[in-house]
Amino acid sequence: MKITNKLGQEIIKRLAENIDVDINIMNLDGKIVASTDKSRINELHSGAIEVIKTNNSLILNNEDVHYYPGTRPGVNLPIVNQQKMSGVVGVSGSPQDIMRITGLIRTSVEIVIDQIYTQQQKYFKERQWNNWLHQLLHPSGYNKEKLLEEATYSLRISTETYWRVIVLQGAGVHHLLEEIRQEITLSKINSLFTLPFKEDEVIIAVSIDFEAIQRLLNWLYHKKVRIGVGDQMYGLDGIRQSYQLAKQALWFNEGKRKITYSQEWNLERLAGSIPDDVFNNICLKYKHLLESLGEVYINTIDTYFLKNFSAKETAETLHIHRNTLLYRLEQITLKVGLDPRLFDDAFLLRTIRSRKEI
């Protein structure tokens, strides 16, 4: 990992709070890129150049520094990262007094560099994943061949299996990202990705049995999120379609339930797929007449369908007498022209009530 001024300053920042000695970080050109003594930054350190040439430590006493311009008494050690020298760390002071602490400082520097390297790799990988996902879910479509190639050679994953997409929505949902990933790992759930997507959205793609998904959903239920679950579908196209179905389920649900599944909304999806001209030609006049009756009648018809045409259960749910329910159904038949108790008319009414306006 190349030591830049920015990286060097980050290392110094992390170490200086706990170490009361002067520290210099030199790059592979021998230039001081960071120091507790800011006046030395950008100076050429000939001692570091010697360390880089020989790959050995260099101890400088008072009588040695005149042989190495730009140096002071102290100890200079090579910094190794990913089995390669990446720079030099120097500690100023009497070598006899600082020899031991210099070794510890070098170890600390290498640990910090490794941490930063890991963070950078993780960040880079996350950006790769996010870019790939945004391409896959772009509203105008995607280049399947290109994304399959990226999946294989850059992300090193295979999408050729069945996936179910879970969409989490809610303010601050991105703050739960690492916690969700940890839970997925601890539960040994096979997840293709768990990624932030939009400002208030996290997407999870899993290829596991529904029982395992239920355990994850039970855990997520206690978080402040709304959850939409798409159908299980195959490959890249399947991920895209399952995501769209999960989003559609959330849209239909309107926040009424914490968790909603796409298969719960089959009739709504079917009604929404009817072309506008066909729907308007057949249903629009009935829709206007039904809506003119008001919320009491609309709630009555919705409950009647929800209770599978059971007059007894509908009346109990609405806390009304059975005769009141029958009166309302008669009024709907009379004023709308469709009888909720007849199959064909009930189908039209259910379609009207299932079609959500965009």
Image (cartoon, rainbow, N blue to C red):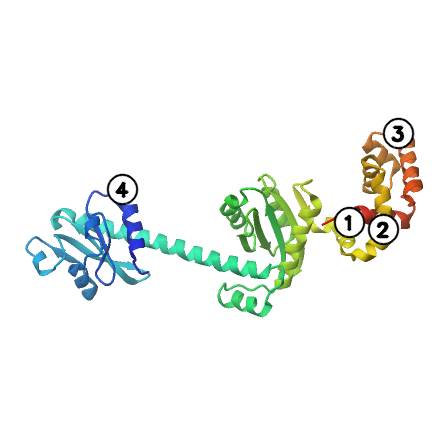
Looking at marks 2 and 1 on the same chain, the residue that comes earlier in the sequence is marked by 2
Q: Which residue is painted at 84% across and 44% down in the image?
A: 288
Give the secondary structure at mark 3. Answer: loop
**Classed neighbour count for the residue bearing mark 2: other residues with Cα under 10 Å, few (<14), some (14–19), many (≥20):** some
Q: Which label sits in the foreground, 2 or 4? A: 2
Callouts 2 and 1 close, C-beta under 8 Å: yes
Q: CA distance from mark 2 to mark 4?
A: 73 Å
Looking at marks 1 and 4 on the same chain, the residue that comes earlier in the sequence is marked by 4
User: Which numbered circle lies on residue 283?
Assistant: 2
Q: Which residue is mark 3?
A: 321
User: Which numbered circle lies on residue 162?
Assistant: none
Callouts 3 and 1 close, C-beta under 8 Å: no
Q: Which residue is mark 4?
A: 17
Say which amino acid is labelled 4.
Glu
Q: Which residue is mark 1?
A: 355
Say which amino acid is labelled 3.
His
Q: Is residue 49 left or right of residue 339?
A: left
Say which amino acid is labelled 2.
Cys
Q: CA distance from mark 3 to mark 1?
A: 30 Å
Give the secondary structure at mark 2. Answer: helix
Looking at marks 2 and 4 on the same chain, the residue that comes earlier in the sequence is marked by 4
Q: CA distance from mark 2 to mark 1?
A: 10 Å
Q: Is residue 123 above or below residue 326?
A: below
**Classed neighbour count for the residue bearing mark 1: other residues with Cα under 10 Å, few (<14), some (14–19), many (≥20):** some
Residue 3 image-quadrant placement: bottom left
Looking at marks 3 and 4 on the same chain, the residue that comes earlier in the sequence is marked by 4
Q: CA distance from mark 3 to mark 4?
A: 77 Å
Q: CA distance from mark 1 to mark 4?
A: 63 Å
Q: How many marks?
A: 4
Q: Which residue is painted at 56% across and 55% down in the image?
A: 190
Q: Which label sits in the foreground, 3 or 1? A: 1
